[in-house]
Amino acid sequence: MQTGTDRRLQGYVMQADERERYRRQILLFGEEGQERLREAEIFIAGAGGLGSPVAIYLAAAGIGTITIADHDTVSLSNLNRQILHRERDIGREKVESAAERLRELNPEITVRTVGETIRRESADRLVGSADGIVDALDNFPTRYLLNRTALSKGIPLFHGGIRGFYGQATTIVPGETGCLECIFPCGPPEETVPVIGVTAGIIGLLQANEVIKYLLGTGDLLAGRLLLWDGLKGCMDELCIEKNPRCPACGTETDTMPAGDGNI
C-alpha cells in the first residue's frame, strides 16, 4: 500500500540538527527512514490515557504532522494516566494542553488540534490527508465511525483499548484485514471504565510502535491479530482475526449500513 508519505517525499535534505536529534534512530533505519517519518501525517483520536503516550512517542520520533482530536477539558481525575496534561492544565481544553506539551517536546514537528466532536458529516474532513488514524478512544460509536473513515480512505486504523490491568491492540489495514466491526460487531454498554495509568502506557506504546513500523514499511504489523495484554500476570496473548463477509462496514455479502455519530 502506498502511503501519503511515499507521495510527499521529494528529495528533502536533512539538516544537521535533525541528524543529531534522531541520531540513534538513523542508526536503525537510516536517513531515508527518518525522512519518511518527517513527511508523515497521523490523526490521533483522543488526548487521554492512550492518546498521551501515542502522541508523546510519535512526536519524539519525529512524525512530521500530528493532528490530535478531543473535545474535552482536563480534570483532576485524568491525571493518573493522561500524561500529556499537568495539574496546572485543569480546566483547559485537552487539545491545547496536549499541543503545548508536544511542541515543547519537539519544536520541529507540526501539531494540529481538533477541539470538536467527531461526527459522521465531519470525520472525513477532520482526518484529511492523514496516513493513518490512531484509535485512542473510550467509546465505540466514534470508533466505529473512524473505522469506516479509515476504510473509505484506504488508510490503517491503529486500535487500542484498556480496562483496569487489561488491554488490547490491533492494526486494521483496509482490504487486507478484518475491520473493527468484524472484531467487535456490538460495542459494550457505556460505563466509567476503571483503569491504571501503566496499562494505558503499555497499550499506547504498542500503538505508537505499530504506526512507526507501518510508516517505515518494516516488521510485522498486528494485522489480522488482536494482541491481549494481562497486566496482572505480566503476559500477552494473541487472537487471530478474520474478515466477516457479512460485516456491515467492510463485508461483500451485505449492504453497508451508516455508522452512528461519534462523541469524543
Image (cartoon, helix red, strand yellow):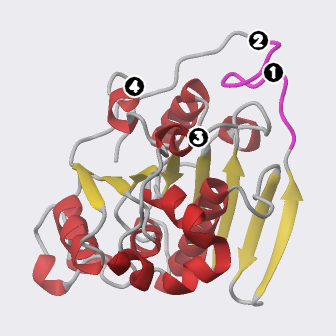
> Eyeballing the image, is 132 above or below 96?
above
Cα–Cα span, label 2 and label 3: 29 Å
Q: Tell me where the magenta segment starts and ends, as one range.
A: 242-253
Q: Dominant secondary structure of the magenta stretch? A: loop
The reply to whether callout 3 and callout 4 are in contact (CB within 8 Å) is no
The residue labelled by disc 4 is 120
Q: Amino acid at mark 4?
A: Arg
**Mark 2 or 3: the one toward you:** 3
Disc with the residue nearer the chain's start (1 vs 2): 1
Q: Position of residue 80 (x, y in %)?
A: 36, 85
Q: Position of residue 229 (x, y in %)?
A: 72, 75
Cα–Cα span, label 3 and label 4: 24 Å
> Eyeballing the image, is 264 above or below 152?
below
Cα–Cα span, label 1 and label 2: 5 Å
The residue labelled by disc 2 is 254
Q: Amino acid at mark 3?
A: Thr
Disc with the residue nearer the chain's start (4 vs 2): 4
> Eyeballing the image, is 196 above or below 12?
below
What label sits on residue 246 in the rendered view?
A: 1
The reply to whether callout 2 and callout 3 are in contact (CB within 8 Å) is no
